[in-house]
Image (cartoon, rainbow, N blue to C red):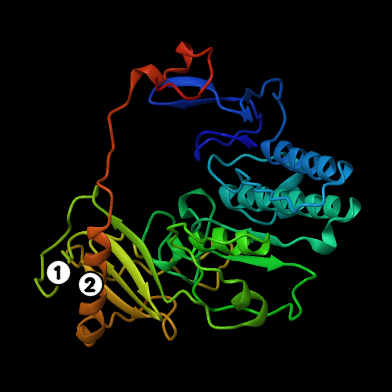
Amino acid sequence: MWKSNSDNYFASSADDKYVKHKYCGLDLWSNETVAVNYSGHYSTHVFTQKAIDVIKSHAERQVTKPFFLYLAYQAVHYPMEVPEIYTKPYASIKDKDRRTYAGMTACMDEGVLNVSIALEKYGLWNNTILIFSTDNGGEVLAGGNNWPLRGWKRSLWEGGMRGVGFVHSLLIKHRGTVNSGLIHVSDWFPTILALAGGNTTGLNVDGFDVWKSIINGEPSPRQEILHNIDPLRPKHGSVLNISKFDNRVRAAIRVGNWKLITGNPLDGSWIAPPEDTGNHSIPDPDPMSKNIWLFDLSKDPNEKTDLFEQRHDIAVPMLNKLAAYQTTAVPARYPPVDPRCNPQLHGGVWGPWQP
């Protein structure tokens, strides 16, 4: 497993230093060994080659058991960096961050292609299930875009939370279909475990096996998604006292086609991509004091029509669901910076420091 300890670390040199809270150190590991001597190598290339090495090793050992490969690229992510060769095809994009973003995406696409070619080369492709997914919406301030969805990364709007992805396998009989059922990141564990011949018996898991929904279009067993309950962000606006849940708390929940947001979801503007001159961005239309919204995403995926006032019959039970989920939450712990984490105390490397 190759990993970087920070989501914010992305550098053209895979072993460049990462700075956090004024502490600076190397932030690249290969299993339990510090990965050095990668200066000048773009991390997307490094991670792709490591994945290919794993595939080649598995094939050469002629292992009959299935293997699981989790390839978590640092692309596409801030800071905006990519070898120049990848931005040349996008010279027509005038916005620099947007142009770099396109190049970073192209480099990532190339990596996925090369991994796929390796699976085919070593005779594994026909029995492989490839899952490709993002983890959040695009960061508008760093080249990303979610138009026509509302909001962006870190917000509770669909532009910030709706993940795009695909599943490919020759094992899927009906390929090229679109699945509109609810699938949450926690569903991948029981789904992949079942595909490998295991099960979740005796495990207290939140996820569902959604494989039949993916390959057959059957209804998803998941009917609701708790997007967020954030106890650390200050409460926002006025309390309504219409349910067991404090609507000033930043939270969001999806039940069927309905989505409820409370508290401060962050900027709710619709931002058109800078290269699309035919579309015009629309600023957040809601007053700063507003703190509760309800949308029917089957009819309004762009969250333009708030139905809270008209559909209290839908909103109040959803608020009560939030209250029920909140009672099961582990108290948040956000300790102050521990000076013992300073990489200079650990050979100049970011890593575990707790005794």
Confirm whether residue 163 shows in the render: yes
Q: Residues within 10 Å of mark 2 (few under 14, many from 20)?
A: many
Instruction: Say if 298 sits above or below 27 in the image.
Output: below
Front position in the image: 130 or 17: 130
Would residue 293 be found to the left or right of residue 245 on screen? right
Task: Please tell me in which quadrant of the rendered image residue 173 appears.
Answer: bottom right
Is 4 rendered above or below residue 151? above
Q: Secondary structure at mark 1?
A: loop
C-beta proximity under 8 Å, tags 2 and 1: yes
Amino acid type, callout 1: Lys
Image point (64%, 23%), residue name: 33
Q: Is residue 274 visible?
A: no
Circle 1 is placed at which residue position? 244
Q: Considering only vertical position in the picture, is 161 above or below 285?
A: above
Question: Is residue 230 found left or right of 91 in the rendered image?
Answer: left
Q: Nearer the viewer, residue 84 or 181?
A: 181
Q: CA distance from mark 2 to mark 1?
A: 7 Å
The image quarter in which residue 41 lies: top right
Question: Residue 228: which disc?
Answer: none
Residue 175 falls in which quadrant of the image?
Answer: bottom right
- Give the residue pinned by disc 2: 319
Quadrant where the N terminus lies?
top right
Locate residue 5, reporting x and y percent: 52, 33
Answer with mark 2 or mark 1, whichever residue precedes in sequence. 1
Tell me which residue sits at (59%, 77%) in the image: 213
Percent position (x, y) of residue 279?
51, 72
Q: Position of residue 40 (x, y in %)?
A: 71, 27
| Tag count | 2
Identify the image quadrant of the C terminus: top left
Amino acid of disc 2: Leu
Q: Residues within 10 Å of mark 1 (few under 14, many from 20)?
A: some
Q: Position of residue 345 (x, y in %)?
A: 45, 11
